[in-house]
Amino acid sequence: MNVHDWLTNLPLSDEASSCRIVEVSFNNGSRKDFYRNSTVQRYEKGDMVTVEGVSGFDTGEVSLSGELVRLQLKKKGVDENNPEIKRILRRAGDRDLELMKQNKSREPEALMRARSIARQLKLEMKLAEVEFQADGRKATFFYTADGRVDFRELIKVYASEFKVKVEMKQIGARQEAGKVGGIGSCGRELCCSTWLTSFKSVTTIAARYQNLSINQTKLSGQCGRLKCCLNYELDTYLDALQGFPDNADILETAKGNALLIKKDIFRNLMWYILPDSNKQYPLSIVTVRKIKEMNGRGVKPEALQAEELVSSRPKEVEPDFVDVVGQISLRSLEKNDKRRKFRQREQRDQQDRNRGNARNTPRPPQQQNQPRPQIRKNKDKGKTN
């Protein structure tokens, strides 16, 4: 949803030939459209502008400007000189932003009321989002449905209920998940609600090429369809599978036909299984080609010899001094604490014993028999001898 303008600091050789088309996004990037800048001002990414709307005006944020817009026009198949491209009216003011905020606050309540009306009319449809124009004169209702829905009566009820011009737009399940948002099984925000704008069809063939189990619960996303990320690594797997032999699904042996169950592109192994046996035989690509050549000559090997599963990557040796959080258990910490407390207690007891021995030690004999010095007062001189 976000694009970095890497041409913004490059000088233009001809100002008149610069692109005057600006890409504007609405509703937090869920909808984007192109508008012609017929004013003398230049708008940068992030500026709020007021553009032409249906019987009024709309307010959005500039998402892309400059020469990169021409690349987007070419990608979307839009002619730059098309006179039907709407214009930018002005830079959005405080009044425009306040009016847009008021009308956007009506969307949650309008969505609940619109769903209630659709249930009352017993229409087989599901409303995903309601988007009001900035001036409040038009409302777009996005819905999903399995079949065709006759909503002629519904539009009349919506127009009288919300006092706006009503537009119904059908979207798919993937677009609905992108508008609602959520967290995927990978722990990250959904790709369709963050950066993915073009949706490609995803089939179970992509899962088979990647040796994934065909489990509908694990392969389905929040929208109930197959996950878009199944196509991300598909080209890498297809390139890696080009080195594997073709038409090697069955190998003829003396014990029966061995059936291919999976291909391991990381170790270049092909796994086979014999009939009436649950044992799996990993064979290298070279071995499979030799057996196919033997079958072409009408020769069948007696049995399959499983290859040794030895990884070619060198084994990483972890240094002894590395200390990772979680390797130290609480039990070892408790033992160290007890050992430290025991040493401190032993030191205190030793000090107490040393003090007691010093108190009970008798004085030497010469100190016991030595008389105390007598103090005699001299009355005549008032001195003490």
Image (spheres, rainbow, N blue to C red):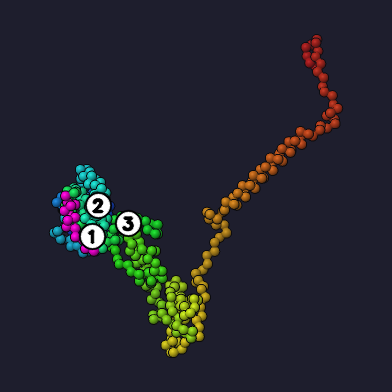
Q: Amino acid at mark 2?
A: Ser
Residue 221 place in picture, x, y as percent: 35, 61
Q: What x and y, as percent, mark residue 21?
A: 20, 57
Q: Nearer the viewer, mark 3 or mark 2?
A: 2
Q: Earlier in the sequence, mark 2 or mark 1?
A: 2
Which residue shows up at 25% across the image and 46% down it? 105
Q: Secondary structure at mark 1?
A: strand
Q: Give the residue displayed 33% in from the left and 64% down from the top.
A: 225
Looking at the picture, tell me which residue is in the foreground, 68 or 1. 1
Residue 194 numbered tag? 3
Q: Percent position (x, y) of residue 116?
A: 25, 52
Horizontal placement of 112 versus 163: left or right? right
Q: Let me know if residue 218 is in the magenta part.
A: no
Q: Which residues are magenta?
A: 147-160
Task: Mark 3 or mark 1: name the one nearer the start of the chain.
Answer: 1
Q: Which mark is residue 170?
A: 1
CB contact under 8 Å: marks 3 and 1 = no
Mark 2 or mark 1, whichever is nearer to me = 2
Q: Earlier in the sequence, mark 3 or mark 2?
A: 2
Which residue in the protein does label 2 denote? 116
